[in-house]
Image: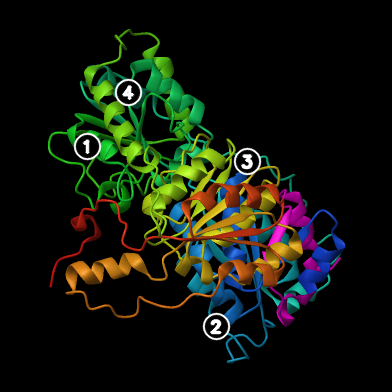
Amino acid sequence: MKSSELVASNLVGADVRAVFGLPGHTTLGLLDAIYKEPRLRFVLVKNEQAASCMADGYARASGRHGVCLSHVGPGSANMLVGVASAFRDSSPMVALLCDEDSGGLGRDVFQEWDQVGVYSKVTKWAAQARSAKEVSRLMRLAFVRSMMGRPGPVAVDLPMDVLNDEVPEGSVEKLPDYGNYSGRVRPDPAMVKTVADMLLKAERPLLVAGGGVVWSEGSRELGELAEGLAIPVAVTHTARGTLPDVHPLFAGILGRWGNTTANDLARSADLIVGIGCRFADINTLRWSLLGGDTKLVQVDIDPNEVANQYPVDVGVVADAKMFCSDVVSALKERSKKTEVSERLESMRAHLKAERDYYLSGEFPEVPIKPQRIVKELTAVLEGGTIVTVGSGKHPEFANKVTITEPRTYLKSVGFGSMGWAFPAALGAKVARPERQVAALVGDGDFIMSAQELETAVREKIAAVSVIFNDRSYTSIRRFQKEFYGGRYIGVDYANPRYDELARLFGAVGLRVEKPSELRPALQEAFRSGEPAVVDVIVDPSEFPPVRWGIMGMTRR
């Protein structure tokens, strides 16, 4: 067997079902091996950035590794955006970086660059295979390291000569089947008792669920912990759906682009228990939410994250699911009244008022208000629809869509990548073809990856893109208005007709200019069962309230 065939067999052994990528001469041996393996689907993209974003969306929607493949040099350089997004948001991905012959590396060979060195900055681990004998070990190590502990991307550099080498019979160590690994860490029982005591004594506790709850599959246990003591739960963007938005203890999204209700609860809490949450600037309004006399408990699978952002009263290295389960067990031996308090009633009233801002009005204006899109999406989307959200102004509205399940709200949060949401939606649809998938994107965001409409049509990936089209990089335009005297530089542009562009690629294309046209267009797009674009002309002047200080901006 060739080394490339060994790579393909390792992909199958790791339960990989799709590989996203674009060919180059260094990839040919591996592509041929993938072609011979009927259990692997190769999804050809138009740009390698889309390959990594698709792999990221695939991983977040499925809970399995996303895999992307690139040619050396510019190919692997293009793939960095999606890999870095996965790294910042702890999404498991394996990036296969094909390379020139190992004998030419270091001699300025065509398209050579230090792939391993660059990728080591945006992955948990990166390594180069130096011989066919070690390929199987490195592939195994890649999949294990990607998922163990805090998930994240890894990279394996595969020189062309190594991929084409024959693997000597008997030279490959027999390895156990994939899947016999666990990264779960049970919390220290003494720490569990301490946290349980703190929760019982607290008068204004708040649970903050982060992405670690999603990756540990701990949503049920989180709900049991919250319900046991009637504690409100705020979620980070990566944890949307761990407690359904409609749950009576749901306090909203914490931090930037979140809910005032959740942020106010954090400010007034006497105890905050962060579970699988890093307390980084996005979730703390640039570290302004927490402080004073608030006691802080941080639970994380990664010891490097505990107390990294804030000093904590109790730090616990543990799996989020196991932590919640153990605290629930500890609390069963005690008793505390869990009646609906005035604090909870006030929280629900304030959260309802926030939702009403986006959902209760008719919003009949032309150009269309972004709130009207949220209102119509809420009426049209099926339960369990996977929603990807881009970057820019539109997330301030789009993130108000109701989410009720984990892995159904996907966003590049830590890296904030534009051009991510549309290909991520395609990856999510490949992972979960039975689900509706909607990409909610701005016009500037969508055009950065619009060429992947061809990929969606060719591969029959029936995701629907809803474009908030205001013909500007409007969030940056707003900064220029507020802080630079209205000097608008590099933010205004002309768009093509996105509905016509979609039809040129062979997708369904719909344009909406009046509010009354919106719901029928959305229904038609989802009913079509084909890749579809709904281009909605929105009011560029409509903004939700914003606190400028959270962006670190000062007037000049």
As for residue 26 lying within the magenta part, the answer is: yes
Indicate which label's residue lies in the foreground, 1 or 2. 1
Q: Nearer the viewer, residue 383 or 515?
A: 515
Q: Where, by quadrant of the figure, is residue 68 drawn? A: bottom right
**Residue 456 vertical position relative to residue 116 in the rendered view, above or below:** above
Residue behind mark 3: 181
Q: Are marks 3 and 1 in contact (CB under 8 Å)?
A: no
Instruction: Name the spot of residue 35 as percent of width and height, x first.
Output: 83, 65
Q: Is 376 positioned to the left or the right of 299 in the image?
A: right
**Residue 511 vertical position relative to residue 192 in the rendered view, above or below:** below
Q: Amino acid at mark 4?
A: Ile
Q: Which residues are magenta?
A: 1-28
Residue at position x 58%, y 81% in the image: 74
Residue at position x 24%, y 53% in the image: 546
Residue behind mark 4: 231
Q: CA distance from mark 4 to mark 3?
A: 34 Å
Q: CA distance from mark 1 to mark 4?
A: 15 Å
Residue behind mark 2: 113
Q: Regarding mark 4 in the picture, which secondary structure is present there?
A: loop
Residue behind mark 1: 264
Indicate which label's residue lies in the foreground, 3 or 2. 2
Q: Regarding mark 3 in the picture, which secondary structure is present there?
A: loop
Instruction: Name the spot of residue 174 as percent of width and height, x first.
Output: 78, 51
Q: Is 60 positioned to the left or the right of 292 in the image?
A: right
Q: CA distance from mark 1 to mark 2?
A: 49 Å
Residue at position x 48%, y 25% in the image: 221
Crowding at dot 1, Cα within 10 Å, few <14 / some 14-19 / many 20+, comes out as: some
